[in-house]
Amino acid sequence: MAESKDQLVFGYWACRGLGEPSRLTLQYTKTAYTEKTYHFGDAPEYSHDEWLKEKFNLGLDFPNLPYLMDGDLNLTQSKAILYYLGRKFNLLGTNAKEEALIKMLCEQAYDLRVQYGVFCYDQNGDSESERKKFLETNVTEYIKQFDAFLSKNKSKFAVGDKPTVADFQLFDYIDASCSLEGGRALLDKYTNVKELLQRVRELSELKDYIPNAHAQLPISGKMSKFGGQVDTFSRAYLFDQAQKFIDEFEKSHRPSIPM
């Protein structure tokens, strides 16, 4: 996308990481923006040079990734960026109570994502048995709590009947965490969470982005022990798509029975 002084600029690593909820927000709102993508070097050093050569020359008060530039406003910190976009595009609820609930969900999802990230960058991320154990303990407890909240709230989306930034944060961070072995089966047990993720996937504004640009990004940086390659991305999503195709195929080829 060609850069314009009137466009927002979003900078982050070439992965979903902590930046994808903001990307989803920008895509959902059909905002014209320029993306500055930074890449890690190859193993074993995984150089950060591509970022470091620009880090202190961008006018950022607290140089870090992700960053967002909007006119004379330069922001860092993933949640500050997400909340700013939420306010800018009216995706933070309709009143103070809804805004508080949205931010609470975003913070809770962030805690899950950080735990998942720390685990996947650790040596244990290389072990299938440890991944299953992490899913059964840490991830399951978060999913259980999210499901209970959604059951109590009884709205189409996480907070209210229209998407908010909480839906995008929940979608990406839960989807990432459930890429671990057993994640698909876990979501089958918690239908409120599963249905929320599906509603986000089916949003017309995201129907092209999620299966394409989103799908081409690894969950984490390439040096992580799990999630650093595209082939481990969003397994729950791929399974859902495959199952949907199978169901539609069987339905269309089912022989008619005379009554």
Image: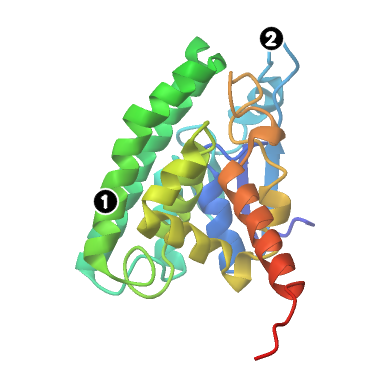
Q: Which residue is mark 1?
A: 104
Q: Quadrant of the N terminus?
A: bottom right
Near-viewer residue (229 or 198)? 198
**Location of residue 247 by image quarter:** bottom right
In the picture, measured across the screen, residue 50 lies left or right of residue 119, that is right
Residue at left offset 32%, top offset 66%: 159
Residue type, mark 1 in image: Met
Per the image, the residue denoted by label 2 is 45
Q: Is residue 230 left or right of residue 127?
A: right
Distance in Å between CA atoms under marks 1 and 2: 37 Å
The picture places residue 3, in percent across and down from the top left corner, at 75, 55
Classify mark 1: helix, strand or loop.
helix
Mark 2 belongs to which amino acid? Glu
Relative vertical location of residue 154 with respect to residue 123 in this rendering, above or below: below
Name the residue located 65 percent from the left edge and 36 percent from the top edge: 218
Specify which label sits upstream in the sequence, 1 or 2: 2
What is the basis of the colouring in this image?
A: rainbow
Residue most toward the front?
259
Q: Mark 2: which secondary structure?
A: loop
Front: mark 1 or 2: 1
> Where residue 193 sits: x, y (%)?
39, 55
Tell me the residue at 60%/54% (across/down).
Answer: 240
The mark found on residue 48 in the picture is none
Q: Residues within 10 Å of mark 2 (few under 14, many from 20)?
A: few
